[in-house]
Image (tube, grey):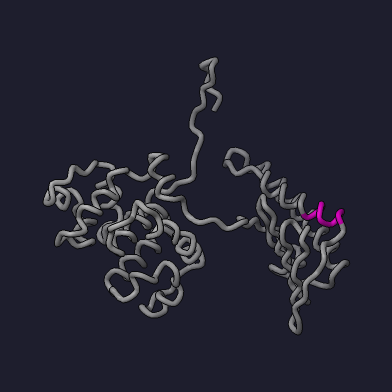
Amino acid sequence: MGRVILFDGGKDGGVYMDSGSTRTIPPLAPPVLAHLGAVCDLLRATPKHPSEAESAKDMAFLITRISNIAVERVEAAIGPLDPTDSLVYLAAQGGFICGSGGAPPRPVTWPATGASSIQDLVAGSTLPPDLVAFLRCSTETDLQVTDILEDPVAAARSIGFPLSAAAAASLRKLAPSQLAGVTDPVDRELVGFFHKVIADGRYIDTWASQPVAVATSIGVTLSDAVVDRLLGSNAVAGAVPELANLSIQQGIVVGIIAIAILEQPSQITNVVDRSQTAKF
């Protein structure tokens, strides 16, 4: 039995792998590709709000049946597939993974994206605009990163910097003493890893680009979610003009705040058009 990865909605063909070989495959027949695309669209259309849980359950049953038929059509074209995680469908609007064992397909985000840039975070009022300026001003002082995180107000006062309450709160959330207060488990694991890297001191310049190797070296086991988050953060931690003149540790602080502490999914809470009527 084998596994197959289809690229660009299958229009560019894909790769088929079994225990003895790997080969490229041409695009499947248009009806099969349309069938796979329909599974992807239905996954994207499945309700996510708790108030629509019953509808989501009904759709999940339907999607599972439709995806099972799709797998059968793929197997008829290229050969038998493994029962689990053997069909990976990737397209511009997302993707999914499933197998021939009848389990529901699971959506995957595609293409993979990194974290937002510092410019985007500042422009969207997500990253306090004075935070990077404060860290830059502290670069030539005796202030240590851990001191700045544990008591940013006192650190700012010591160098005469008018630090905003928002920036102080953001920095304080990264303090070692506040780790238990990080509610999201992935964020908490990432911040805990950050503390261990800073304490070790040997891998400050490589931890984001080589997270697995660094974690192994300092005796930490990372989840796939944290590895993905770090690999996607490299554009934030140290690669934009706003971080010029910061120390490596300070650049990491900004990156971690951006990807683990501040960045939240956007939510529409209320929309009012010209009629002044609330729509959402």
Residue at 34%, 65% in the rendered image: 194
Kindly report the secondary structure that dominates the magenta region of the rendered protein: helix
x then y, percent, for residue 96: 68, 58
Residue 122, position in %: x, y?
38, 43
In the rendered image, which quarter contains the C terminus? top right
Left or right: where does residue 218 sit relative to residue 75?
Answer: left
Compared across the picture, whether 258 is left or right of 160 comes to: right
x, y percent for residue 195: 31, 66
Of the pair 36 and 54, the residue shown nearer to us: 36
* Stretch in magenta: 30-36
Numbered marks: total:
0
Residue 276 lies left or right of residue 159; in this view the side is: right
Residue 167 inside the magenta-drawn segment: no
On the image, which quarter does residue 186 sit in? bottom left
Which residue is painted at 81% across and 56% down in the image?
33
**Quarter of the image holding residue 233?**
bottom left
Which residue is located at x 48 percent, y 68 percent?
223
Is residue 226 toward the left or the right of residue 181 in the image?
A: right
Q: Is 111 above or below relative to 221?
A: above
Residue 53 vertical placement versus 84 (above, below): above
Identify the residue at image location x=72%, y=57%: 8
